[in-house]
Image: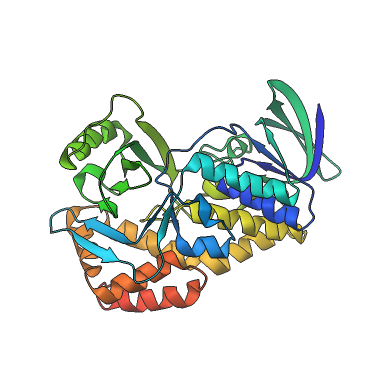
Amino acid sequence: MRLEARVLIIGGGPAGATAGRVLAASGVDTLILERDLAGAKPCGGGIPSGAFTELDLPQSIIRRKITRLRVFPPKSAPFQIDFPSGFIGIVDRKHFDAVLRDMARAEGAAVMQGQFSKFLHKDKGIMKVEALIGGQPAQVSAEYIIAADGVNSRVRAMLGLGRLAAVHTLGARVPVETDACEFHFGALARNGYGWVFPSAGKASVGLGGMDPASLKASLGRFFALRGLELPDSGVRGYRIPLWEPMPLASGKKVLFAGDSAGMVMPFTFEGIYYAMRSGALAAEALAEGRPALYGKLWKKRFHLRFLLMKTLWSAFMKDDAGTERLLGVFRDARIQQKGIRLWLDKSHARGSLSSFVSALRKYILF
């Protein structure tokens, strides 16, 4: 079997599906190759309300809207942050990813189940790769490739780019009564946090941290502290990339988006929105035939935000004292609302970021 497209997208999650949608809407011949069209990534499924407008997403895919957070510091009393406007939309990843692929199809992108195997060769500027489709090897030709194949990216591996550093997570979906997204900090999840993200029916409950060997025991203790019973089955783990400044392309023909580009916000570890935006920016660059534009667009829009959150994570999340100091800042209602605005509505990122940093300077000496 031989297939051709101007752009081959490897991975049909939020980054790949959004890239395919934007490219196809621009009239670019696009093929999305997704390893498992029925799969579902372990994920809390939280998306800020501003993303639904910014990325033209149907609110019908939201399973539950959350308008408050509860923060549990390592030592001091927990506190609550209410949203004056906006919400966190909780989605089911299996359904959400499928809807995004359907939106790409509606614009004219082709979507196929298949797995990238290896690069073959380049012929007059055309990339040729081998993929397994229906269990049989197939050759796919494309002028450009967007690699959106996750934190364990096979494309990165085949290009000799090495494995991305990551935070390890472990969690399960269980019945929980709560009306807020919960974030639990402390020794059970050093350099990360425990979470409870309620949805319709069951909630996503889990831990993320740097030491995978201790996560299972820590997860059991976290469930017990939260008054929950750890299920015998259904516990799933995943690696979440640790963002570092890195090239978003390999040469002029292969661009990276989503987890394969490390597009997860440090400290908060928010990934779905940034996966979609990176896919859209990569697509915009290729639609103009200017792959180098991708990195420039991303840097202008998001680099300072990622750098700030990386600095906060590195400086304050290594021990309980640092975590208490940072979280204590968010007991101030002004800081809360500036932070929530920055999180929920990213359409005015530069102004919101400047306002947030100015407020933080009164409390924290960088």
Which residue is pictured at 51% across the width and 61% down the height? 51
Residue 248 in sight: yes
Tell me: residue 5, above or below residue 21: above
Q: Point out the residue furthest to the top here.
A: 135
Q: Position of residue 162 (x, y in %)?
A: 53, 39
Residue 254 in sight: no
Tell me: residue 333, above or below residue 281: below
Colour setting: rainbow
Which residue is pictured at 73% across the width and 23% down the height? 137
Q: Point out the residue furthest to the right here.
A: 124
Which residue is pictured at 33% across the width and 57% down the height? 313
Tell me: residue 153, above or below residue 132: below
Q: 253 or 19: nearer the eye? A: 19
Q: Is residue 344 left or right of residue 313?
A: right
Q: 141 or 342: nearer the eye? A: 342
What quarter of the picture does the C terminus occupy? bottom left
